[in-house]
Image: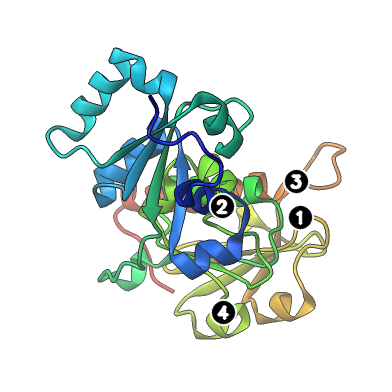
């Protein structure tokens, strides 16, 4: 028999709240990971999750349990088995994978980063958690260190943002409820805002040294205050007929233009400084 079959069980109530409430996630410092891929990455970077929650059919599949033993070795976290129907009710996805992890939201990492390695992202009022997760995924791939989110951004630790980021959260310092204007003013390098009204081209400017890219709301773009706080305002050239790019696509292009320039500078003998 499953450990839990009632929706009124305290753990089930907690999981439902964690799936749906940003306030409850912040209050408890907990969130949910859906699927073994995210759980594996979390474990490899940060250690054991607080608890695993699996469906009855997942638990009864000996291959699944053997795989968990391979991942965690002799340190298997506590496992709670939930009836299949109840698991579907608490899962954050329409087609459940059969396994969830309850985790503590990671604390900010204190790393010694030299000036030329400072690579940050400022996000103003990004509303869609899928977009936010995609931006975080590209940021981690490009070796961004810190991501600052305004208070109006979607919750970075929602299950949807976590799924879209595919584990990127655990390689980044994610600062929520940030004063972006103040951060931009104090940043020790070039703060570069993307704006369709800008006259400068992304591919025409130097991205050597410390850089912070600023991206705005999917529909409204950046506020005037953030545009004014930036050192440079740039546009991504679009020779086609599309009016604008998705925020996540624009961010990825900017991140990897910096990666390209840094790689070219290394190949030619070193990265310059601002």
Q: Mark 1 or mark 4: which is in front?
A: 1
Discs 2/4, front: 2
Q: How many marks?
A: 4
**Residue in the foreground of this view, choosing between 149 and 197:** 149
Query: What residue would you read off at disc 1?
Result: 218
Separation of marks 1 and 2 at Cα, in angstroms: 18 Å
> Which of the marked residues, 1 or 2, is nearer the chain's N terminus?
2
Please tell me the numbered disc located at residue 184.
Answer: 4
Look at the image and tell me whether residue 92 can be seen. Answer: no
Whole-percent x, y for residue 178 in the image: 56, 76
- State the quadrant of the C terminus: bottom left
Circles 2 and 3: CB distance less than 8 Å? no
Say which of marks 1 and 2 sits in front: 2
Percent across and percent down for residue 29 are 43, 64
N-terminal-most mark, 3 or 4? 4
Q: Secondary structure at mark 4?
A: helix
Gap between marks 3 and 4 measured at Cα:
23 Å
Q: Which mark is residue 180?
A: none
Marks 1 and 4, how far apart in space?
20 Å
| Of residues 142 and 69, the one drawn nearer to the viewer in this rendering | 69
Badge 2 or badge 4: first in the primary sequence: 2
* Residue contact between numbered discs 1 and 2, judged by CB atoms under 8 Å: no
Q: Classify the position of the N terminus by image quarter.
A: top left
Label 3: which secondary element: loop
**Residue wearing tag 2:** 158
Query: Tell me, what colour scheme is on the image?
Result: rainbow
Question: In this image, 172 relative to 131: left or right?
Answer: left
Query: SS of the residue at dot 2?
Result: loop
């Amino acid at each position: 028999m499953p450990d839990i079959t009632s929706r009124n069980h305290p753990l089930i109530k907690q999981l439902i709240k964690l799936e749906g409430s940003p306030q409850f996630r912040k209050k408890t410092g907990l969130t949910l990971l859906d699927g073994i891929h995210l759980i594996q990455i979390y474990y490899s970077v940060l250690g054991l999750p607080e608890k695993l929650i699996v469906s009855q059919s997942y638990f009864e599949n000996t291959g699944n349990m053997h795989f968990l033993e391979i991942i965690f070795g002799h340190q298997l976290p506590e496992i709670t088995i939930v009836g299949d129907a109840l698991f579907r009710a608490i899962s954050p996805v329409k087609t459940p994978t059969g396994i969830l992890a309850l985790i503590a939201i990671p604390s900010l990492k204190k790393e010694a980063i030299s000036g030329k390695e400072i690579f940050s992202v400022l996000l103003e009022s990004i509303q869609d958690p899928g977009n936010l997760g995609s931006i975080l995924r590209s940021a981690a791939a490009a070796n961004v260190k810190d991501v600052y989110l305004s208070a109006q951004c979607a919750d970075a630790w929602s299950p949807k943002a976590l799924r879209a980021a595919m584990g990127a959260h655990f390689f980044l310092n994610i600062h929520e409820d940030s004063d972006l204007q103040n951060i931009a003013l104090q940043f020790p390098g070039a703060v570069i805002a993307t704006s369709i009204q800008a006259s400068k081209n992304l591919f025409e400017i130097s991205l050597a040294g410390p850089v912070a890219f600023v991206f705005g709301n999917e529909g409204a773009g950046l506020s005037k205050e953030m545009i004014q706080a930036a050192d440079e305002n740039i546009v991504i050239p679009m020779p086609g007929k599309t009016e604008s790019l998705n925020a996540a696509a624009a961010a990825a292009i900017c991140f990897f233009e910096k990666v390209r320039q840094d790689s070219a500078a290394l190949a030619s003998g070193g990265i310059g400084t601002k």
